[in-house]
Image (cartoon, grey):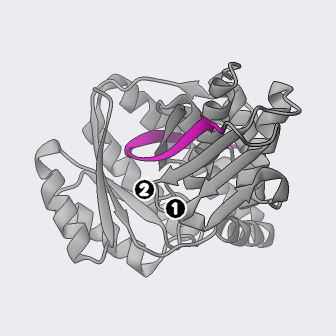
């Protein structure tokens, strides 16, 4: 049996603006993960590949599944990338602890886990950049016009500075970042939020371009602060980034309430993370305030919280 476990992700800075060519920073969240097991299936017919994904009620032979569905698609694309027309009889099982449609990169993590487990089991392991490219093609099915940041950060499993159409830049942090993620429990397809921003951008391009520029400047400043280990300085940058996301119409009363609760409980800064509207937010806090921030988010309506540390 071959197993691949791929982390979720959180966007620290730059969501939405990254779709319009500005940079973003994302980090892996190892406390949640997509897990794929690939096993030989002796006795089955040559070329048979049994797919099991109980969380989404999907099961069956690959040949009988809808090839446009993201899970069969990444399997088929990986086999094609490996030049394998007829694999040995296999069984592939997908499980995940990453909440779906929460902004934590569930779809990208599953795709990368499939590509990694399948390629390793067949003796042709892929480089992270190739796994990321395969996952990005499938992200188009999920999101229509994805930025590429989700598949990049989960494939490399490191903090990533990312600008669309440029090579991703994984980097190490100068001092640990302690983050609390609050989940609204409200699922929303990324394509809906991204599509709404695009409509408003088309209506008022100059105003939105100014906001995207401001977000890009925050990302670049934050990148330098993270690498230098000046973690507390990131708090005001997160707060400013959240205000700009409010202005482009992707926050919501529940996200704003969670952001406010986190800062009142002692977080240095907080913002929504991901597509917005629903999904998740995150707060950066001193280590000694993590429990207080987590409790405040629960009181403010978060259906779940996740604490994570980025960097040693």
Q: Position of residue 145 (x, y in %)?
A: 77, 55
Residue at 68% across / 43% down in the picture?
148
Residue designated by label 1:
244
Question: Is residue 16 visible to the viewer in this orientation of the structure?
Answer: no
In the current view of this chain or complex, which residue is farthest to the front? 43
Residue sitting nearer the eye, 182 or 257: 182
**Label 1: element kind:** helix
Residue sitting nearer the eye, 257 or 203: 257
Give yes or no for contact between labels 2 and 1 (Cβ–Cβ under 8 Å): yes
Q: Position of residue 204 (x, y in %)?
A: 75, 69
Q: Say which quadrant the N terminus sits in.
A: top right
* Magenta residues, start to end: 21-41
Q: How many marks?
A: 2
Q: Position of residue 305 (x, y in %)?
A: 30, 61
Question: Is residue 92 visible to the viewer in this orientation of the structure?
Answer: yes
Residue at 31% across / 55% down in the picture?
306
Q: Quadrant of residue 150 in the image? A: top right
Residue sitting nearer the eye, 291 or 48: 48
Residue designated by label 2:
240
In the current view of this chain or complex, which residue is farthest to the bottom? 253
75 displayed left or right of 249:
right
Residue neighbourhood size for the residue with mark 1, other residues' Cα within 10 Å, grouped as few (<14), some (14–19), many (≥20): some
119 displayed left or right of 145:
left
């Amino acid at each position: 049996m071959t197993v691949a476990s791929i982390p979720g992700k959180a966007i620290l800075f730059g969501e939405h603006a990254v779709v319009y060519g500005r940079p973003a920073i994302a980090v892996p969240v190892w406390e949640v993960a997509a897990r794929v097991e690939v096993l030989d299936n002796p006795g089955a017919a040559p070329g048979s590949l049994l797919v099991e994904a109980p969380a989404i009620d999907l099961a069956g032979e690959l040949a009988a599944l809808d090839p446009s569905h993201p899970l069969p698609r990444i399997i088929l694309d990986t086999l094609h990338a490996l030049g394998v027309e007829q694999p040995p009889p296999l069984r592939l099982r997908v499980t995940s602890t990453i909440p779906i449609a929460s902004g934590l990169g569930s779809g990208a993590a599953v795709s990368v886990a499939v590509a990694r487990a399948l390629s390793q089991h067949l003796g042709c392991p892929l480089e992270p950049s190739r796994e990321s490219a395969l996952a990005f093609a499938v992200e188009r099915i999920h999101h229509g016009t994805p930025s590429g940041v989700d598949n990049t950060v989960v494939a490399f499993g490191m903090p990533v500075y990312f600008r669309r159409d440029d090579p991703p830049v994984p980097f190490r942090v100068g001092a640990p970042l302690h983050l609390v993620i609050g989940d609204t429990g409200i699922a929303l397809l990324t394509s809906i939020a991204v599509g709404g921003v695009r409509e408003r951008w088309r209506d008022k391009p100059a105003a939105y371009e100014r906001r995207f520029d401001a977000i890009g400047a925050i990302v670049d400043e934050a990148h330098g602060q993270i690498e230098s280990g000046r973690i507390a300085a990131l708090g005001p940058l997160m707060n400013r980034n959240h205000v700009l996301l409010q202005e482009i119409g992707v926050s919501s009363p529940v996200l704003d309430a969670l952001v406010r609760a986190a800062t009142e409980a002692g977080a240095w800064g907080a913002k929504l993370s991901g597509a917005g509207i629903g999904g998740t937010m995150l707060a950066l806090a001193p280590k000694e305030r993590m429990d207080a921030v987590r409790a405040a988010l629960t009181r403010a309506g978060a259906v779940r919280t996740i604490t994570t540390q980025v960097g040693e």
